[in-house]
Image (tube, grey):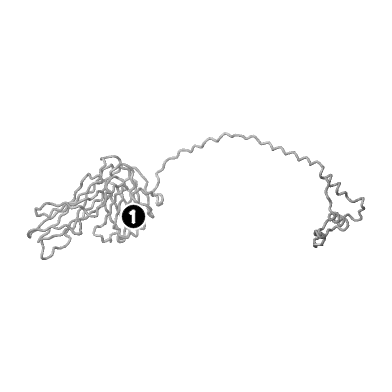
Amino acid sequence: MHRRTTPLLAAAALLVAATGTVTVLTADGADDGDVLAVAPPAAHASAGDRPNLLAADRERRIAPSPTPAAAKAPAPVAAATTEAPAPPRTAAPQKKVPAPATSDPESAPDDGSGYGYTPGVVVHPFDPGRTSHSVTRDGVTLTVRFSTVTPKTGQSVILTLDGAGGSGCCSLHALYGDGIGDDQQVPADNPCTSTSSQGSFTHAWNTPGRYLLQLQASRHGCSHGEAYPVMRVTVDVAPGAPPVSNGPSAPVAAFDIAAYPPANDRGLVSWWGQGEDRDGHVTHFVLDPGDGTAPKRIPGANTGPCQQTKGGYAAGSMAWLPNDPPPQHRYAKPGSYTATLKVYSYGCDGKHEQVASATYTYSW
C-alpha cells in the first residue's frame, strides 16, 4: 500500500527540514497565520545523516507487537486455622441482699392505678414479715403500720398512718394498688394547726396477688400540699374469701330538703339526696316520705356505666336525686314526718347489693 503525498505536504516537509517551523496555508494557498513549531534539525546534519522517515515508519508498522508480560501468579493464601471456643464463664453465686428503699422515681413503677411520676417518692421493696414503713421529706415524717403481716382476700386490714413534723400536717391519703383509694382529713374539722396527725384506713383486697400501695401526707392547708412525703409499699395478698363484685365498703347516703316550702303551701316539700360508694356502683334511690304513703323508687342522676377496677370491685361512684325538677311530696296535714332515703349499690355484674339510708325530719 502506498501513501499519496500531495504537493502541499511535500512543501511542508521541505520547510520543516530547513527551518524547523511550518506555516499552514489554506486550500487557496493563502497564509492563515498559524505556525506549527516542530523540533529543529540537528546542527550541520548532512543529507546522509538525516533519518529515513519512510523506512522508519515502515519498520514501525511491520514490527511485531511486544509480548505482554506474564500475569503474576496470585500470592498463596495461608490456610485458616480454627480455634476451639473458650468455655463460658460461670459467675460465682452471690448472697441475695434485700434491696433498700430508694428515692429514685424511675424505680417506682406504675401499678396501673395512675400513680405515675411522683418527685421524691420512696419505694419500699417487698419485705415479708414487715408491718411498718416510714419516709421523711421537708420535715414531715409519714409512718404506716399494718394490722396483719399476711393479709388474705376478703380480710379487712387496718392501715394506721402517722404524719408528724412541720405545721398543719392534716391530710392523709392511701391508694391500695387495686384501683381503690381513701382520703382522710385529720382532724376532721380542718383547722390544720396541729404538728402531728393520725388516721386509719380499712381495706380488703378482692383477689390474691402482689399490690403496690401509695401512701401520702400533706400539710399547709391540705388542699395545696406544698410538702408531702410519699412512699410506696409492696404487699402480698394470699387467697382467702372468694372474690365479689361489690367491695366491702358500704355506700353512704345524704338527705335534705332542696328548698324551704313556700309560706302559702307548707305541705309541699322538694327533696335533695346523694349516694356514694367507693367500691360499688350506685344505681338508684328509694324515698319514703314517712306519712304512710308508698315509697317511691327513683333512678340516680349522673350515673354512668359501671367501671370495674383492677382488683375486681366496681369503681367508686356517686349519684344524686334528680334536680330538674327535684322529687316532691305533698303532706296532707300539719305534723312531724321522718322521711327516709335509701341508696342502692351493686357490682358491675348487678350482684352483691348494698344499701345505706339517711333520714330527714320535716315538721309544719
| Residue 343 relative to residue 147: left or right | left
Which image quarter is the N terminus in? top right
Residue 344's place in the image compared with 77, above or below, is below
Residue 206's place in the image compared with 274, above or below, is above
| Residue 29 relative to residue 354: left or right | right
Image coordinates of residue 126 in percent, x first then y, are 36, 44
Residue that lies at the very extreme toward the front in this rendered image: 28
Q: Quadrant of residue 334?
A: bottom left
Residue that lies at the very extreme toward the left in this rendered image: 333
Residue 23 or residue 254, whichever sits in front? 23
The residue to which callout 1 is attached is: 141
Name the residue located 59 percent from the left edge and 34 percent from the top edge.
82
Image coordinates of residue 324 in percent, x first then y, are 20, 59
| Residue 40 relative to residue 117: left or right | right
Q: How many marks?
A: 1
Label 1: how many Cα within 10 Å (few below 14, some 14–19, many 20+): many
Residue 34 or residue 218, whichever sits in front? 34
Name the residue located 64 percent from the left edge and 34 percent from the top edge.
79
Image coordinates of residue 113 in percent, x first then y, are 33, 49
Which image quarter is the C terminus in? bottom left
Residue 32's place in the image compared with 250, above or below, is below
Q: Secondary structure at mark 1?
A: strand
Q: Amino acid at mark 1?
A: Thr
Residue 293 or residue 22, whichever sits in front? 22
Image coordinates of residue 28 in percent, x first then y, are 81, 60
Residue 61 or residue 339, whichever sits in front? 61
Q: Quadrant of residue 171?
A: bottom left
Name the residue located 31 percent from the left edge and 59 percent from the top edge.
219
